[in-house]
Amino acid sequence: MRLTRSLLACGAVAGPLFIVLVLIQDYTRPGFDPRRQPLSLLSLGDLGWIQIANFVVTGLLYVAFAVGMRRVLHPGRGGTWGPLLMGAFGTGLVIAGLFRTAPGWGYPQGAPAGVPTDAGVSYVLHGAGFSVVLVSLIAACSVFTRRFAALGERRWAASCAVTGVALPTIYALSGVLSERGENSQPLSLLLRLVALVGWGWASLLAVRLRREIAAASDRAGGATGLSSNAR
């Protein structure tokens, strides 16, 4: 039980860790403007190793969370696809960290002012990693919407459903605004919102599952105590 709680704790801290590190870099990295430049560009330059580590460590924490999730839920509702999708989410983050995006949107200094033009293998694989992240998160929201609805947890079912709709909506909106040529500012800020909503939901889910096993442990302990008293 202690190992399971530790694995779930990995998921609880992963989202806040990622977001805090991005915010620190946003406002301390020389020449970086979070209003115009996507967070993936933080992987470039002399200090790029910080964001690379942020992607990889956060991804590994979510993979550990997926293992803990399986220990809690399998073979019940959401116990198969939930951990698989969360593991895919974490793996996608690791891929996005190991393969960097290309210079663009004016960062680093001397890069093209708009969309990256040097679309090499690393750039493509970085994009593929992000696609895995987004698709797996949306699918996981669907899985847990059904799970919580079946358990009668209406608020959690609603939050999962809203998150599952919000993620593709925000991402699609960022693309539409970018195509309208609004200096890429909406694209950058909305992609950060995807991370805030998606990563935040996954970490809140980890907290929720930790509470579930804590409650189950308390019930089991209470039942054991009653049995002892009866004897």
Image: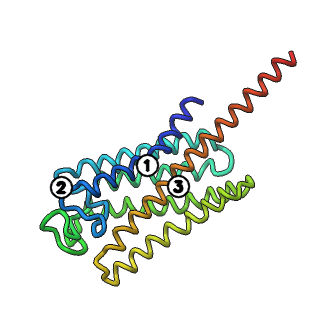
Q: What's the residue at 44%, 63% (across, down)?
A: 194
Question: Which label number is shown at residue 16?
Answer: 1
Q: Is residue 164 above or below residue 184?
A: above
Counting from the top left corner in percent of width and height, residue 55 is at 35, 50
2 or 3: tag closer to the N-terminus: 2
Residue farthest to the front, as pictured? 27
Q: What's the residue at 39%, 63% (across, down)?
A: 192
1 or 3: tag closer to the N-terminus: 1
Counting from the top left corner in percent of width and height, residue 149 is at 71, 58
> For the residue marked with disc 2, what is the amino acid?
Gly
Q: Is residue 126 above or below residue 59?
A: below
Q: Disc 2 designates what residue?
A: 45
2 or 1: tag closer to the N-terminus: 1
The quarter of the picture where the C terminus appears is: top right
Dots 1, 3 in contact, CB < 8 A: no
Quarter-of-image position of residue 191: bottom left
Residue farthest to the left, as pictured? 110
